[in-house]
Amino acid sequence: MTELALRIVGSGAIGSLLGAGAEQAAIPYSLMPRKNTSRTLEVIKQNRETVRLKHNAPEPQTLTEKDILVLPLKAYQLADAARAWQHRLLPSTPVLLLHNGMGGYEAVRQYLPQNPLFLATTSHAALRVSSNCVQHTGSGRTDIGPAPDTTRSEDLAHQIVRVFSACFAPINWREDMLSALWIKLTVNAVINPLTAIHNIPNGELAKPEYTSCIASVITEIFRVMRSEGYDISKDALRERVYEVIHASAANYSSMHQDIAHQRATEIDAINGYVIRTAKKKGIDVSTNSFLYEKVCALQASKGVLT
């Protein structure tokens, strides 16, 4: 059976890591930077192997059901990317979103109302170490599953699992991806703003001075999740948050790096999403609001437009 070809938009660290996996596994792929000036040429894997990425593969004008459009972008970039690609996809072309935060699926659906849409979240970590080089800094698991309104296709699901297992292992297929995204959102809502505000690597959050704030963020999101119908315990959320803090102790979060390099952050799709959802339910999320405001002020102080 012909493998799905990965059409990876953007030149971010995670998209580059996915491209390196495809290169090693001989999976057909193309990297499509949003700007001609931004091209990752090589990825340094955790075993120190350097993978050279190809940029001369012909880019098809129209993507079909034999391709999968992968959008490993910032949450705020998704709508523009979907708009740019909407006339180059068949209605049968599958699309996969891989980003932090929530709300991306709804933004993309405005422009791609018919395409099979898949959601993914990963705990792999990668860092851009130069303009043309990305380093794989932490192994993790990737959850993938259909968006709520995507018609189930066992054949397509098997194709996606097979391809991503070959180049981005391990893969966990989930039918309840929104639940998985909320859990990842909780992790991001703790780690991203706190590491950005305090200018620290992830592992510093295990120190006692952050315990109270972390507990408050988790409690607030737990209440919002329960109001949305998700059956999960607060202890399970806390366990997952600290698991990631310890597993990625030496890493710097994406939000920390965005602030350090004077880029817009994904705060609106992370703590901002929690705040908007809580407001509809009348739930107090004052700690999330405090972190949101602090990061917005930090962005403004760096001259970053949001």
Image (cartoon, grey):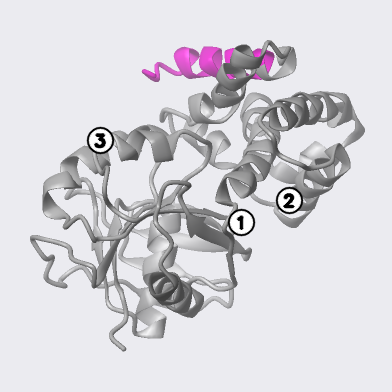
Q: Residues within 10 Å of mark 1 (few under 14, many from 20)?
A: some
Q: Identify residue type, mark 3.
A: Asp
Q: Sequence-wise, which precedes: disc 3 or disc 1?
A: 3
Between residue 215 and residue 104, name the one nearer to us: 104
Residue with the most extreme bottom position: 1
Disc 3 versus disc 1: distance between alpha carbons? 25 Å
Between residue 32 and residue 129, name the one nearer to us: 32
Disc 2 versus disc 3: distance between alpha carbons? 31 Å
Q: Identify residue type, mark 2.
A: Val
Q: Sequence-wise, which precedes: disc 2 or disc 3?
A: 3
Secondary structure of residue under mark 3 = helix
Residue beneath disc 3: 80
Disc 2 versus disc 1: distance between alpha carbons? 8 Å
Classify residue 112 by image quadrant: top left
Give the residues drawn in magenta, as a range: 289-306
Q: Identify residue type, mark 1.
A: Ser
Q: Residue at x 47, y 45 (%)?
A: 99
Q: Quick check: marks 2 and 1 in contact, CB under 8 Å?
A: yes
Q: Residue at x 28, y 78 (%)?
A: 28
Direction from residue 10 to residue 251 in the image, left or right: right
Between residue 37 and residue 91, name the one nearer to us: 91
Residue beneath disc 1: 123
Residue 297 vertical placement versus 188 (above, below): above
Spot occupied by residue 16 in the image (x, y as percentages of width and height) = 38, 61
Residue beneath disc 2: 244
Residue 61 vertical placement versus 241 (above, below): below
